[in-house]
Image: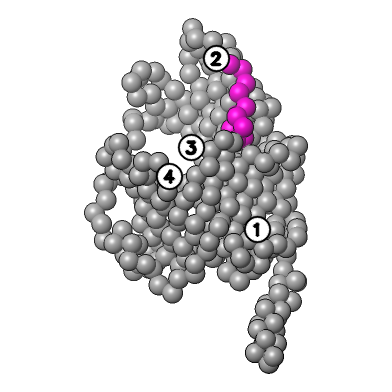
Amino acid sequence: MRLFLLVLLTIAFPTLAQDDMTPKAWLENMSQALRQQEFKISLIQLQADHIRPLVYIHGHVDDQEVAFLEHLNGPPKNAVRVGNTVTFIEHDQPAYSVKANRIQGVVPPAFAGDISGLEAGYQFVLAGRSRLAGRPSQSIRIIPKDDMRYSYQVWLDMETYLPLRYDMLSQDKQLLEQILVVELHVLDDAPEILKEAYKQDWPPVIKQSERIPADNWQFTWLPVGFEVLVKDSHRLIGSHEAVEYISLSDGLTHISVYVARAGETVLPEEIVGRNGLSLSTIRKGNAEIVAVGKAPAETLTRIAQSITIE
């Protein structure tokens, strides 16, 4: 009986302390946990009709972050991150590396970044508690301050603050994408697979196609919180067609905008996928503007319409 009471007290005291935590504090603890903890998770990614079982391992070797992502179904497909370089290993092509500080497909990279950067476009709200992967969890809602983007909800393990579930929801609360952890292992040290990955001589980062700065295209309107990350000009591989490329983000939502000379092919004005990915196309004079991203189609159309040339 005494042992049973001690176990209850061990569980209760952290919970009582956490009752006073703000939703932002929960998310900041999550960001720190994703960067600093050693762990292995088995998870399922749900997108429309696609179900992908994955294994993700994270740790540190010689003070560098190292991570490994494995797709469990279909042909072998893995990704390895050492520091700010991610290498993709697939069965039907040579391995290649790119510059990136997170492996896409696990949780949004912003979850491991500066949470304050999301506050311009979103508010954080404590939701209920639940049990996921056999562990008590706290739910946090990430609600947009306007109707220009989707909402999100994340469930955090109450012991480690690691995310156990992540939902992306449409404006009418329909589930667009979900990451669901089915098993979490907290590790004492980086496993051998990460140590071997750290020692491996991976391919060098691939060179980008020739690009020059693009300063003549400007936006007269962007949703609050969105910033231009990249703006340049390059030629498409194969066709060599000149394209202006602009990358936008509010931290969670990423939108790509392409501006090119209008062609003879009639493109659809709007496409909305069941996983939340939308596409909007407009024409301005002899220019064709395409906006793509996981955001409402109306948002993409308004962004595309706001582009002007100086």
Q: Which residues are magenta?
A: 267-278
In the rendered structure, are the residues bearing label 1 and label 2 in contact, judged by CB atoms less than 8 Å apart? Answer: no
In the rendered structure, are the residues bearing label 3 and label 1 in contact, judged by CB atoms less than 8 Å apart? Answer: no
Mark positioned earlier in the residue sequence (2 or 3): 3
Residue at image x 33%, y 42%? 90
Write down the residue under mark 1: 155
The structure's colour scheme is one colour
SS of the residue at dot 3? Answer: strand
Residue 124 location, x and y as percent?
Answer: 72, 55
Picture quarter with the C terminus: top right
**Magenta stretch containing residue 277, yes or no?**
yes
Q: Quadrant of residue 282?
A: top right
Residue 260 location, x and y as percent?
Answer: 48, 18
Write down the residue under mark 4: 73
In the rendered structure, are the residues bearing label 4 and label 3 in contact, judged by CB atoms less than 8 Å apart? Answer: no
Write down the residue under mark 3: 230
Residue 73 location, x and y as percent?
Answer: 43, 44
